[in-house]
Image (tube, rainbow, N blue to C red):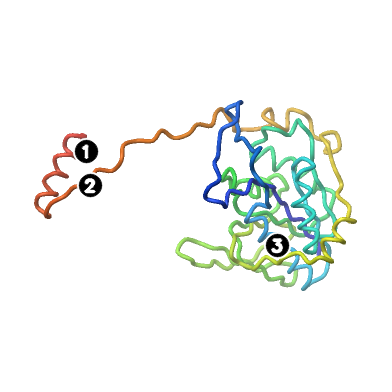
Amino acid sequence: MKIAVCVKQVPDTSDPDTEVHIDSSGKGVDQSKFSFVINDADNFAVEEAILLKEKHGGEVVVVNVGSEAANQVIRMALAKGGDSAVRLDDEKFAGSDPVALARILQAGIKDLGCDVVLTGCLASDDGYGAVGVALAALMEVPHAAYVKTVEVLNGTLKIGRELEGGLLEMDEISTPCVLTIQTGGNEPRYASFKGIREASKKEIKVMDLAATGLSEDQVGEAGSVAVMVQYSVPVVGELAEILEGDASETAGKLAGILKEKGLV
């Protein structure tokens, strides 16, 4: 079984004291004071890929769209059990929306002959959950989202999808396919010192725009259906008004406020 697992490097905002500031362009966040980690859901996707490899054999290829700085999260995925990696890096990729990113990922994956492609279900930096689904559409293969369990059957996969309320929907899906992995379905391992040493020797193939076979109008803002216009900080509004008194008194006050605001 050959598995591609897509990973993204994101700012580490786990520290509650971390301050987020909009950069001078107004279209991004100042990342100069951030440290970076693997996207949370992608970490679970990496673990799922390695578990499948350990149980059924095969190969895990780590795929990333990013600059050389992303090598740190790629190397960590390799240290946990990945075999090789592809990093897609070109300044013309900047500004790509989820559809354009999926197109770039497809270009990096198309010649690998993968049985399964795994992505995280959600990006923790921009909140998008569309890349994996768009990737499946471009690859013209079936997909399932928010997957927590994966079991290999004879020619198909039995997967459990998380629904609202913690319900688990069980489905069968044929391969090749794309699965977006939900957090909590496994327990991501720590990389061993031996794995880290070995990862430093593993290949990271770098592909620029020319190597993907894509044109400039298929990537970046030109290849996007949604273009970032501006970030803004929400305006702080008035504090909540606390109504004091007994039930009948506060009910009367509340009715007066609702009427004043035109809500009743």
For mark 3, what is the residue?
A: 174
For mark 1, what is the residue?
A: 263
Q: Is residue 132 above or below residue 43?
A: above
At horizontal 53% and vertical 47% (from top left) the residue drawn is 17
- In the picture, measured across the screen, residue 237 lies left or right of residue 133, that is left
At horizontal 71% and vertical 48% (from top left) the residue drawn is 140
Q: Are marks 3 and 1 in contact (CB under 8 Å)?
A: no
Q: Along the polypeptide, which appears first: circle 3 or circle 1?
A: 3
At horizontal 69% and vertical 48% (from top left) the residue drawn is 8
Q: Residue furthest left?
A: 248
Tell me residue 22's x, y (percent). 56, 32
For mark 2, what is the residue?
A: 242
- In the picture, measured across the screen, residue 262 lies left or right of residue 46, that is left
Q: Quadrant of residue 30?
A: top right
Tell me residue 85's x, y (percent). 83, 52
Foreground label between 3 and 1: 1
Amino acid type for the residue under numbered disc 2: Ile
Report the front residue among 241 and 202.
Answer: 241
